[in-house]
Amino acid sequence: MKIAIMGAMREEIDPILATVGEYSTTEYAGNIFYECSYAGHECVIAYSKIGKVFSAITASVMIERFGATHLLFSGVAGGISKELKIGDLIMASELCQHDVDIVAFGHPYGFIPEGSVMIETDGNLRSLASEVAVDMGIELYEGIIATGDQFVASSERKEWIAKTFNADALEMEGASVACVCHNFGIPFFVLRAISDSADGSADIDFDTFLQSSAQVSATFILEMVKRLGD
Ligand code: SAH
């Protein structure tokens, strides 16, 4: 088992690197990959940079070049569901790309021919996360996460994504990572702590809560790593 732990932004990965202790670094494909041993597991850690393209590159490299057998994503997201407050954790049941639009040809939003609108995360990793949440006394939400190359800071766009995909949270990398892992046959898990509500004050909230929410997500992911393979 080799575990990939990835985020999109430096702030999402810093708390993880600070905890794992010693690591080696490798530069490859325009990014830096950190390898270490943590809780008895070989790990490769990286932040991809923001968005679907960079995150797809990083996930692919972690699998193909670094031999990751499992991938855990840790980061922050905009909350859609009214139940989700800033700092709350949501794990993706399924993910979709809210900005894919070839509806002119009669396809539904988010659909690419020979693909599917939704990609499901690994059931075993979700079960493990549920156990970790109970043991840590943390409420862990489960729901659909919608991904797109847009920072959503408008109630109108948020409502459209909610209605079209039944999504509970939105961000900019999860579905592309899901697509990579699905195609390589790698079990994967996407966890996000809410940093903002994807509405008119999203930019200000994001800047205020990025670090604290990233820390919440990172702490949870590391607890999962400790228990993987138990
Ligand atoms: N402030 C940053 C940009 C952040 S983009 C800069 O200037 O560089 C937002 C990041 O957090 C993305 O990685 C995305 O996955 C996540 N995210 C959090 N809230 C979001 C929202 N409301 N819309 C889209 N992505 C969001």
Image (tube, rainbow, N blue to C red):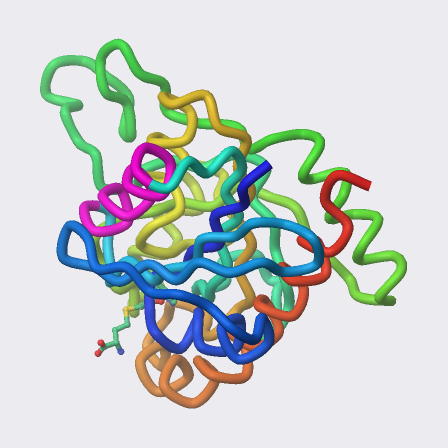
**Quadrant where the N terminus is found in the figure:** top right
**Quadrant where the C terminus is found in the figure:** top right
- Foreground of the two, 168 or 122: 122
At 58% across and 68% down in the image, what residue appears?
A: 218
Q: Is residue 102 left or right of residue 211?
A: left
Q: Quadrant of ligand 1?
A: bottom left
Q: Is residue 221 left or right of residue 14?
A: right
Image spot of residue 45 (x, y percent): 43, 58
Above or below, comparing residue 229 to residue 151 in the picture: above
- Foreground of the two, 121 or 107: 121
At 28% across and 41% down in the image, what residue appears?
A: 61
At 45% across and 63% down in the image, what residue appears?
A: 77
Q: Residue 31's quadrant in the figure? A: bottom left
- Foreground of the two, 8 or 196: 8
- Foreground of the two, 150 or 230: 230
At 26% across and 62% down in the image, what residue appears?
A: 32
Image spot of residue 120 (x, y percent): 53, 28
Above or below, comparing residue 230 to residue 193 in the picture: above
Q: Which residues are magenta?
A: 53-65
Image spot of residue 123 (x, y percent): 67, 29
Which secondary structure type mostly characterizes the magenta part of the structure?
Answer: helix
Q: Is residue 215 left or right of residue 46?
A: right
Question: Is 138 in the magenta?
Answer: no
Above or below, comparing residue 143 to residue 159 in the picture: above
Question: Is 59 in the magenta?
Answer: yes
Q: Residue 152's quadrant in the figure? A: bottom left
